[in-house]
Image: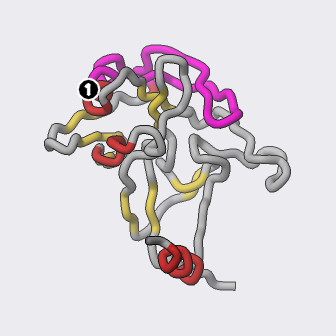
Amino acid sequence: MTIRLSQLYIYPVKSMAGIPLETSELDAMGLKHDRRWMLVDRDGQFMTQRTHPQMVLIQPAITNGHLQLTSSKGETVEVPCIEHAEEHMTVQVWQDQVKAHRLSSAIDAWLSREIGEPCRLVYIADDEIRQCDPAYAKEGDRTGFSDGFPLLLISEASLDLLNQKLD
């Protein structure tokens, strides 16, 4: 069976702007660099556009394997690699407790200014296991900070129907 994809995006930071791709590598957590970073509040609870729509104004980019963030004003910062993480912490993604790495208090301060409230940028390491819902996946199937699964696909027909129903 052949599947044709018309659009391919990754969202390196959960709920920030996406990056269109022509191709992507797959790793153990799905598309390479997809939802590996996430913003959390002071309590380690994940933050999304659902409650913080200003997140979409921050544009991520992957350059030579490193994450860069650009504000709506054009200011760009480079996020340190996991090797330079400042601390480990447990964060909450829906009902899951996940071990994550807090990367930089300077980046946290920059993002807090952009978002308008205190937040921290965290990263899920390659060796962390966040099990996909066992009702729909095999033992060992894992994902990063996505809502539940490493790959999310929708048919163009379904998307067209959805768009017809929107005001």
Corner quadrant of residue 22:
bottom left
Q: Position of residue 66 (x, y in %)?
A: 35, 40
Q: Which residue is mark 1?
A: 113
- Residue 110 in the image: state x and y as whole percent: 26, 26
Q: Nearer the viewer, residue 74 or 42?
A: 42
Label 1 is placed on what type of residue? Answer: Arg
- Judging depth in this view, the residue of 106 and 127 nearest the camera is 106
Where 117 falls versus 70 (above or below)?
A: above
Residue at horizontal 14%, vertical 42%? 73
Q: Quadrant of the image for the C terminus?
A: bottom left
Can residue 68 be seen here? yes
Using the image, determine if residue 5 lies above or below residue 120: below
| Number of numbered discs visible in the structure rendering | 1
- Residue range of the region highlighted in magenta in the rendering: 83-109
In this figure, which colouring scheme has been used for the structure?
Answer: secondary structure
> Residue 67, position in %: x, y?
35, 40
Question: In the visual, does 110 lie left or right of 56?
Answer: left
Measuring from the top left, give residue 36's x and y in whole percent: 51, 41
Label 1 packing within 10 angstroms: few (<14), some (14-19), many (20+): few
Between residue 161 and residue 6, name the one nearer to us.
Answer: 161
Image quarter of residue 54: top left
Tell me which corner region of the image, top left, top right, bottom left or bottom right, holds residue 108: top left
The residue sitting at 59% across, 67% down in the picture is: 153
Whether residue 14 can be seen here: no
Please tell me whether mark 1 sits on a helix, a strand or a loop.
Answer: helix
Q: Residue at x 28, y 40 (%)?
A: 69
Identity of the residue drawn at 55% across and 33% down: 124
Q: Please identify the residue farthest to the front as the structure is shown.
A: 167
Locate the N terminus and report the quarter of the image it occupies.
Answer: bottom right
Is 15 inside the magenta-drawn segment? no
